[in-house]
Image (cartoon, grey):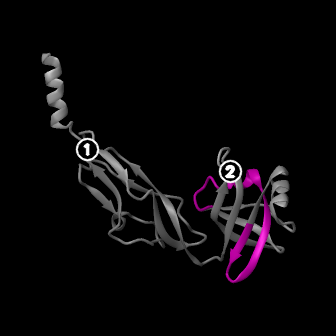
Amino acid sequence: MSEIRIAAETRTEFGKGAARRARRAGFVPGVVYGHGHAPVHLNLPGHDLMMALKTPNALLVVPIEGTDEYVLPKAVQREAIKRTIEHVDLLLVKRGEKVTVEIPVLTEGELAPGGNLLEHVLNALPIEAEATHLPESVTVSVEGLEAGASILAKDIVLPAGVTLAVEADAVVLQVIGAQAAPAEDEAAEAEGTEA
């Protein structure tokens, strides 16, 4: 995973009015916490932050008190209609430190013929990995799976240095059989055609 450098400014004004002024100027208010340090309030460039957050678990590098620090997005608040970023909570991490995050589960391949459906029981897989080497996603092959088949967390091949942060027997994907039309509906249709 590549590091994304963001030029942030320390925030000295607080409250709703200050946050609105920052947003009008194109910034997103944020707070950095972790490792027992006092929270640091920042204004981050809105467009740069939006682009960075398109990558799951983006590792950001922000200047804090004159030093470049690694941070991970922990919580992102968005405006309900426009979906613009209103506020971001960032977690301070160190190189070599293990962190727990969720990565998207992607699928490849085709299910066995028969109109079966693939259900994502877990859309994101909880994992533990080194903060500066987080995988962006994990891809699972569903080629030829038939109704009733399931893929458990322990069946997913993870990159080196990455471990599961969920029960090994947790169902991640399952194949649901196509539903046949109920017998009563077929009988009603037959009566309708006779009449």
- Residue 37, how many percent across, how many down? 73, 81
Q: Is residue 189 above or below residue 26?
A: above
Q: Which mark is residue 79?
A: 2
**Residue count near mark 2 (Cα–Cα under 10 Å), binned few <14, some 14–19, many ≥20:** few
Image coords of residue 170 (percent x, y): 35, 66
Between 140 and 100, the residue placed more toward the observer is 100
For residue 112, which numbered disc appears in the image?
A: 1
The answer to whether residue 149 is above or below residue 31 is above
Residue 43 part of the magenta segment = yes
Magenta stretch contains residue 2: no
- Circle 1 packing at 10 Å, graded few (<14), some (14-19), many (20+), is some
Residue stretch rendered in magenta on the structure: 31-58
Q: Secondary structure at mark 2?
A: loop
- Residue flagged by tag 2: what amino acid is it? Glu
Q: Is residue 82 above or below residue 184?
A: below
In this view, 104 is above or below 134: above
Quadrant of image for the C terminus: top left
**Amino acid residing under circle 1:** Ala
**Residue under the point 20% across and 39% down:** 180
Q: Quadrant of residue 125?
A: bottom left
Quarter of the figure that contains the N terminus: bottom right
Say which residue appears at 35% left-offset and 68% top-offset: 154
Q: How far apart are labels 1 and 2 at the CA level?
A: 42 Å
Comes first in the chain, label 1 or label 2: 2
Left or right of residue 23: residue 170: left
Numbered tag placed on residue 171 in the rendering: none
* Residue 33 figure quarter: bottom right
Q: Nearer the viewer, residue 15 or 91?
A: 15
Q: Point out the frontmost of discs 1 and 2.
A: 2
